[in-house]
Image (tube, rainbow, N blue to C red):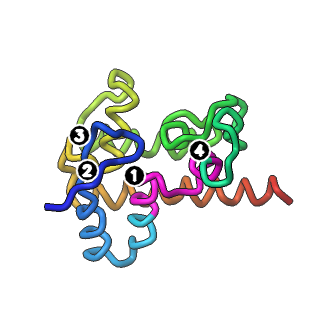
Amino acid sequence: MWRATVALYPSTHIVPCTLWTLARLHQRYMSHYKYMMRLVTNENDLAENTGRIDGTPHCHRICMLCDTYEVETVEHFLMRCSTLTVYRNRLLTILENKLGIIYRHLPVRYIMYIILGLPIADLGDVWWSRIATTVYQMAKYRKTLLEAFNH
């Protein structure tokens, strides 16, 4: 079985084939699963990654959506950005409904592992689709706000 080391979590291995398999099974969610893979592999449009590509110092890769002045990492995007709270609450509700977990008592990294598809929990196709759709909606909303900000 092919495994890739996640750029964000060098000590953690994932099976990227899972997301691609789901994408092939559920063609209408293809773009959602592709975005999830971009987050997992750190090949995304968040400031941490784009800044790495264009040479921006790490401390200047801050989130343009909120006032926390944090570097816009995958963790910030999914778990901390105050502008994306509505979407994050949807994600956490999905996890709470499916897994019965009280997310307020879990470390942020553990919740991210579940959202990004690490083999901690078997959620099933329907629940992965819900998670991928919500993350994709977060990304689209982020893009819309950034485009408005840049004009």
102, above or below 91, in the image: above
Q: Verify CB contact (< 8 Å) between mark 2 and mark 3.
A: no
Residue underneath mark 2: 14
Q: Verify CB contact (< 8 Å) between mark 2 and mark 1.
A: yes
- The kind of secondary structure element at disc 2 is strand
Question: Within the image, what quadrant is residue 21 found in?
Answer: bottom left
- The kind of secondary structure element at disc 4 is helix
What's the residue type where badge 3 is placed?
Leu
Residue 48 counted in the magenta span = yes
Mark 1 or 3 closer to N-term?
Answer: 1
**Residue occupying the point 28% across, 59% down:** 16
Kindly report the distance in space between the C-alpha atoms of the residues bearing marks 1 and 3.
21 Å
Q: Position of residue 106 (x, y in %)?
A: 33, 25
Q: Quadrant of the N terminus?
A: bottom left
What's the residue type where badge 1 is placed?
Val
Residue reaching furthest right? 151
Residue underneath mark 1: 40
Other-residue count near label 4 (Cα within 10 Å), few / some / many at <14 / 14–19 / ≥20: many
* Magenta range: 35-51
Of circles 2 and 3, the one toward us is: 2
Residue underneath mark 4: 48
Mark 4 or 3 closer to N-term?
Answer: 4
Kindly report the distance in space between the C-alpha atoms of the residues bearing marks 2 and 4.
21 Å
Kindly report the distance in space between the C-alpha atoms of the residues bearing marks 2 and 3.
20 Å
> Which mark identifies residue 72?
none
Q: Position of residue 29 (x, y in %)?
A: 39, 71
- The kind of secondary structure element at disc 1 is helix
What's the residue type where badge 4 is placed?
Glu
Mark 2 or 1 closer to N-term?
Answer: 2
